[in-house]
Image (tube, helix red, strand yellow):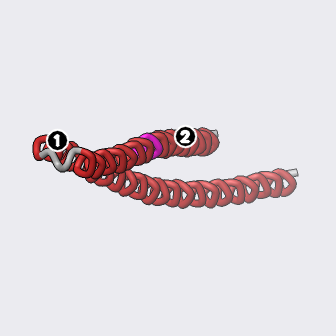
Amino acid sequence: ASLRSIEKDYESRLERSTSNHQSDVESLKTEMSRLNGLLDSTRSENSVLKSAMEEAMVSSGGHAEDVKLLEQALMLSKEQCRALEQQYSETSDENKRNEELFSIKLSALESEKRELENSLSIIQKEKKQLLEQVAASKSDAG
């Protein structure tokens, strides 16, 4: 009976661990998707700013002040893009670490389950032998 409760506890821990991992993975996927969106919009802004800068240089005969402001905006946008790429990379690395950790935990739980199943099998064999001995001793007594 206590072995059954240990097995049920193991199964419940395995389900919780799996559920928590799946939730973490979904959160990371959502975050990576959000970062991808930000990265795309930042790249798009960069392209627009670059075009505007080129247009300003051509149409205004290169007003120095306009060009400087556009260059600054472009540099800030590029820095923002690099920061987002870094954040995306870190999120991706964290996702890989979580998957590796989950794999290790799952392997350990599966190993523990095999041990519990082996223990249960041994206990069942011993119980069978004891019942056979009891039956044999009753027939000897009779």
Magenta stretch: dominant secondary structure: helix
Q: Is residue 103 left or right of residue 94?
A: right
Q: In this view, does 68 lie to the left or right of 92?
A: left
Above or below — where is 118 with respect to 17?
below
Label annotation for residue 57: none
The one nearer the camera, 106 or 41, is 41
Query: Is residue 87 in the magenta section?
Result: no
**Residue at the spot x=26%, y=51% of the render?**
58
The one nearer the camera, 50 or 24, is 50
In the rendering, at what x and y percent does residue 62 appear? 17, 49
**Residue at the spot x=64%, y=39% of the render?**
1
Instruction: Give the quarter of the image for residue 37.
Output: top left
In the rendering, at what x and y percent does residue 73 appear? 21, 43
Q: Is residue 114 left or right of residue 75?
A: right
Q: What element carries label 2?
A: helix
| Residues at marks 1 and 2, CA–CA distance in whole angstroms | 55 Å
Residue 139 in sight: yes
Q: Name the residue under label 2.
A: 19
Of the residues under marks 1 and 2, which one precedes in the sequence?
2
Q: What is the magenta range? A: 31-35
Q: Name the residue under label 1.
A: 66
The disc labelled 2 sits on which kind of residue?
Ser
